[in-house]
Image: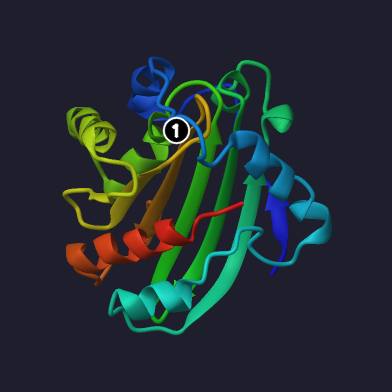
Amino acid sequence: MTVSTRKWGTRVVGVAAAVVLTACSGGSGKGGLSESGLHDKVRSAAKEGTRCPLDYDLDKAASAAHVPGPAKQVSASVSLPEDADDGAVLRTAQATDVECDFRLGPESVSVETLAAQKGTASNLLAPLIQRNAHMSTTQLKAYLGLVLKAPTGTPVVTESGDVALVRLAGAGGDSVVLMLSCGAGQDAQPTKLTSAQVNDLADHLASQAHW
């Protein structure tokens, strides 16, 4: 497995554009996870790494969530603000994004971590949430509202049951979120995990987030 860089283009995907571009600040004060810290940890991953640059132990999280394994890393991508196109949301928000993809038993599992100095990290992921959870715009806006109201560290699972977001404590004004997608992507098979398993898996992965 190799780690690759991924560029966020100038266009925001689909009808989630308005949600992304009207994001507000969502930081959690002192002592949290910073965008600069994430950036510094992963910026050399594409050149030097052969694995997910973040220390997520999916086997441990799956065992705690009673989800059968084993877990195997498949791919990883790193998106940095300086590599994004002019006008892209990643550059505008000064955000770093890391996606680590796994196989967990028969399941495809994606763990995405995004930290932003400006705006709200969960809103920046809106196009991916909408795609992975097969949401309408109305459903997406309602879901993002629930995510913003939830305490940091508390997963919020989509109605489809295959995506969960957890807001993490951000340093200063930074906004940080972990997104777990099971059976991820437009063409993937629906997850066979229950909403409770997706919730618990996201909860245990969020507790491992550090850099």
Q: Quadrant of the N terminus?
A: bottom right
Q: Position of residue 8 (x, y in %)?
A: 60, 33
Quarter-wise, where is residue 91 in the image? top right
Left or right of 72 in this view: 17: left
Residue for point 24% across, 69% down = 197
Q: Nearer the viewer, residue 143 or 37?
A: 37
Q: Position of residue 177 (x, y in %)?
A: 43, 42
* Residue 25 visible to the viewer: yes
Residue for point 28% across, 32% down = 148
Q: How many marks?
A: 1
Left or right of 104 in this view: 101: right
Crowding at mark 1 (Cα within 10 Å: few <14, some 14-19, many 20+): many
What secondary structure is found at the residue carrying circle 1? helix
Q: Residue furthest front?
A: 30
Q: Amino acid at mark 1?
A: Ala
Name above or below for residue 132 compared with residue 70: above
Q: Position of residue 14 (x, y in %)?
A: 38, 28
Residue for point 55% across, 52% down = 99
* Residue 190 visible to the viewer: no
Name above or below for residue 6 compared with residue 203: above
Question: How did the renderer colour the structure?
Answer: rainbow
Residue for point 42% across, 59% down = 207
Left or right of 182 in this view: 151: left
Give the labeled residue for mark 1.
121
Q: Nearer the viewer, residue 206 or 67?
A: 206
